[in-house]
Image: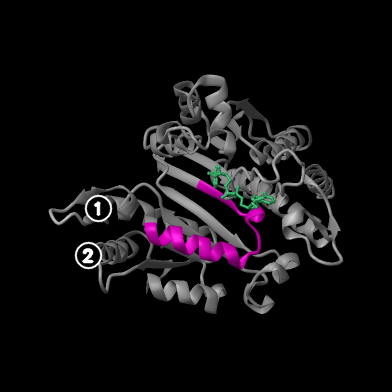
Amino acid sequence: MAANKKLLVLPGDGIGVEVMGEVERLLGWFDKKRALRFDVESAHVGGAAIDAEGKPVSDATVKKAAAADAVLFGAVGGPKWDNLPFDMKPERGLLRLRKDLGLFANLRPATCFEALADASTLKREYVAGLDIMILRELTGGVYFGEPRGVETLKDGTKRAVDTQVYTTPEIERIARVGFELAKKRNNKVHSVEKANVMHTGVLWRETVTRLHAKEFPEVELQHMYADNCAMQLVRNPKQFDVIVTDNLFGDLLSDCAAMLTGSLGMLPSASLGAVDPKTGKRNALYEPVHGSAPDIAGKGVANPIACIMSFAMALRYSFDLPDEAAVVEKAVTRVLGQGLRTGDIMQAGKTKVGTREMGEAVLKALEQG
Ligand code: NAD
């Protein structure tokens, strides 16, 4: 049995703390029942770190995150810290972790549980059983490109500039992650850009085509323009397996795909760095897509499933334990099948439960195997 995997747990603020509490109980279960030992350390991040350590993430915590095999992150933010200067805001803690750990690949699965197919705004037959992975480039593109800024022109009007920029190595490394993911899934990649109107799109398409021919000819590859992809996601989402795209298009398309699955409280994510050629280690941070939800924080009603599914992603992608990940996913599927629902996914005729009861039910389902 694998032993001593190093995990850094950063619950953060608001419901981050509540949903992470349920993941910590799962860790205890794996330790006791499957002899799967984790060296778990926890630290503050976000508002909690501002209160305890004077900044949204301390240098010591960043160091621990870089040394860990995986970071489990809850959520940050809240009204208490809303009026702080930009660089002191809780969200800066997360942005610094992403940057310092070099987390360039953002994986956002959009999975629609059979039991929740009616919660989507699309018809059941289009979303039931949906399982797609949106892979977004996270550290390049128009959100970082230079020059950027706003200038005032001579006539008093303003001019704003953002620059979309990608290099061949940046495209290759994200596309490589996409092909590797597809090999473990349904072997199909859609590479998405706008090569019809953007130079970065042309380079993106050329680079992905070349990499595919050289390293991944066995994977099915299709190119698609981003606007068409948005349309196809709501027309026939099940045609996709892995979608690999840049930072801006990934931002938009992953939110669009999220809505196919019903609720924010169900969506996990992973952010991965490059594999270190010397050690084979890859930095990784796993987090629910939702925020700290101040409107329900402290009430014990948050849905812990996004955080639990983020832990399942850590088992699969950082620890290469697909069977253990599947055990967690199966337990969640079973609990939903039994009709248990937190408020965010509540439907008529189902049983409403809180965070703790949902976590308990997942543990019980794990027991049943
Ligand atoms: P949010 O995701 O926190 O909440 C949006 C809505 O969804 C709320 O009504 C909330 O109650 C509900 N919701 C979210 N997660 C839920 C869950 N697990 N179970 C049940 N309901 C859930 O987004 P917001 O309200 O825009 O932001 C609140 C705070 O969170 C802000 O300070 C924001 O900056 C921060 N935020 C942090 C992250 C992060 O840490 N990665 C992401 C988004 C927002």
Which amino acid, by three-letter code, is at mark 1?
Thr
Q: Looking at this view, name the residue that lies furthest to the left.
A: 154
Residue name at image x 25 percent, y 62 percent: 200
SS of the residue at dot 1? loop
Which stretch appears magenta? 248-270
Please, is residue 58 above or below residue 131 in the view?
above
Name the residue that disc number 2 marks. Answer: 199
The reply to whether residue 73 is in sight is no
Q: Is mark 1 within 8 Å of ligand 1?
A: no
Q: Nearer the viewer, residue 80 or 333?
A: 80
Q: Quadrant of residue 248?
A: bottom left
Q: Earlier in the sequence, mark 2 or mark 1?
A: 1
Query: Alpha carbon of mark 2 to alpha carbon of mark 1: how far?
Result: 11 Å
| Tag nearer the camera, 2 or 1 | 2
Q: Is mark 2 within 8 Å of ligand 1?
A: no
Q: Quadrant of residue 161?
A: bottom left
Residue 215 badge: none
Name the residue that disc number 1 marks. Answer: 167
Q: Quadrant of residue 221?
A: bottom left
Q: Seen in the image, is 153 located left or right of residue 224? A: left
Residue name at image x 70 percent, y 50 percent: 305
Q: Nearer the viewer, residue 15 or 183?
A: 15
Which amino acid, by three-letter code, is at mark 2?
His
Q: How far across and how far down the image is residue 135, in percent?
A: 46, 57
Q: Quadrant of the N terminus?
A: top right
